[in-house]
Image: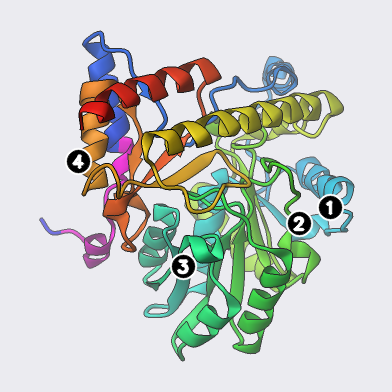
Amino acid sequence: MRLATRMEGIAPFHVMELMSKAQALEAQGRDIVHMEVGEPDFPTPQPVIDAAQRFLASGHVHYTAALGLPQLREAIAGFYAARYGIMVDPARIVVTAGASAALLLALGALTSPGEEWLLTDPGYPCNRHFVRFCEGVPRLLAVTAATHFQPTAAQVGASWTTRTRGLLIASPANPTGTLIDPAELAALWQTVRQQGGSLIVDEIYHGLTYGTQAPTALALSDDIIVINSFSKYFGMTGWRLGWLVVPPYLVRAIEKLAQNLYIAPSTVAQHAALAAFSPATLAICEARRQEFRARRDLLLPGLRALGFEIGVEPQGAFYIYAGIGQLAENSYQLALRLIEEAGVAATPGLDFGNHAPARHMRFAYTTSAERLLLGLTRMSRLLAGK
């Protein structure tokens, strides 16, 4: 038996393997402070659960349209009007089986074999693997703290070739938690548009910003493709529900792919998500955002005091991307030491690209302040002995 050649370019998701190791240690009775996985520790907001239970009680749990429940698409459009002050036609909104499905649909509809997509390095690992799955070629752009780990229009323009299909960016970004300045976002769009390419903007961490607001790329043009999710700000990770906003010309192509790949998003999750935009749910989400900010403000100086190098402070999401140059030579080996000897799980840079991954780690502040303090204390004891 042989595998498809595309599998040669798809690496394992190392953070999930690290999480498995943490779970194995916990099964042995070890206490592990989890800072490795980007999943909010809060439960699903109660109004969302209540909506799901009311719908389930009816017993009529059937397929929806592939593009999603019409009333949910309208609710998402209403959210854009209320939060960003822009009007989005519900017909351009596609409800998906998580943001991962949204990205896969977009890339599947746009990518021909051999075409290139420009992606940041470091960046979310699944993005380059999705490009490869669609028979495209991921081209990684090395980004540093000097540009807030985000690409510049000049860099994109210099990297563009005749085979380049488009640019995929994220703001706020994983693993760095950084945002793209609105002026730079406009410059990036101008560069992509001049080249006749497509721009996909991952906005799944919108809502989780601290001391600033992240404008949606949809304010720049109806031709930009935007991905969002109910997982992060709304705390609905396990419900596997996201959405995609696309130009009108893409809707039919996206619909055909969705019909064939997964029929329709989860009906229960969609009816639950109708309550995500209610005042009660938004109040819960805002309170949690403030808690995430407090956790960031606790963990950031704590890591710096231990010798981690943080060149740019995260303004969004719930990650800190830290250099380890003063502490170790290899982030993967350091991650193993932290989990085995200190009981702290963090993610080595290996997952996020090729640009100095051995010199960086990602810490997720998705656990309580008390647990973060415990993790800092444990790391301090371990690192004091080096």
Outermost residue toward the top in this view: 29
Residue underneath mark 2: 215
For label 4, count other residues whose C-alpha is less than 10 Å away and answer few (under 14), some (14-19) or many (20+). few
Q: Residues within 10 Å of mark 1 (few under 14, many from 20)?
A: some
The residue range painted magenta reads: 3-16
Q: Position of residue 332 (x, y in %)?
A: 24, 43
Q: What residue is shown with label 3?
A: 119
Looking at the picture, how far across and down is residue 202, in whole percent?
59, 56
Q: Which residue, as the protein is rendered here, is positioned at the far left? A: 1
Q: Nearer the viewer, mark 4 or mark 2?
A: 4
Amino acid type of the residue tagged 4 in the rendering: Gln
Amino acid type, label 3 = Leu
Residue 377's quadrant in the figure?
A: top left
Circle 4 sits in a helix, a strand or a loop, which is it? helix
Q: How many angstroms separate mark 4 from mark 2 (CA)?
A: 38 Å
* Image marks 1 and 3: residues in contact by CB distance under 8 Å: no
Amino acid identity at mark 2: Pro
Q: Earlier in the sequence, mark 4 or mark 2?
A: 2
264 vs 300: above or below: below
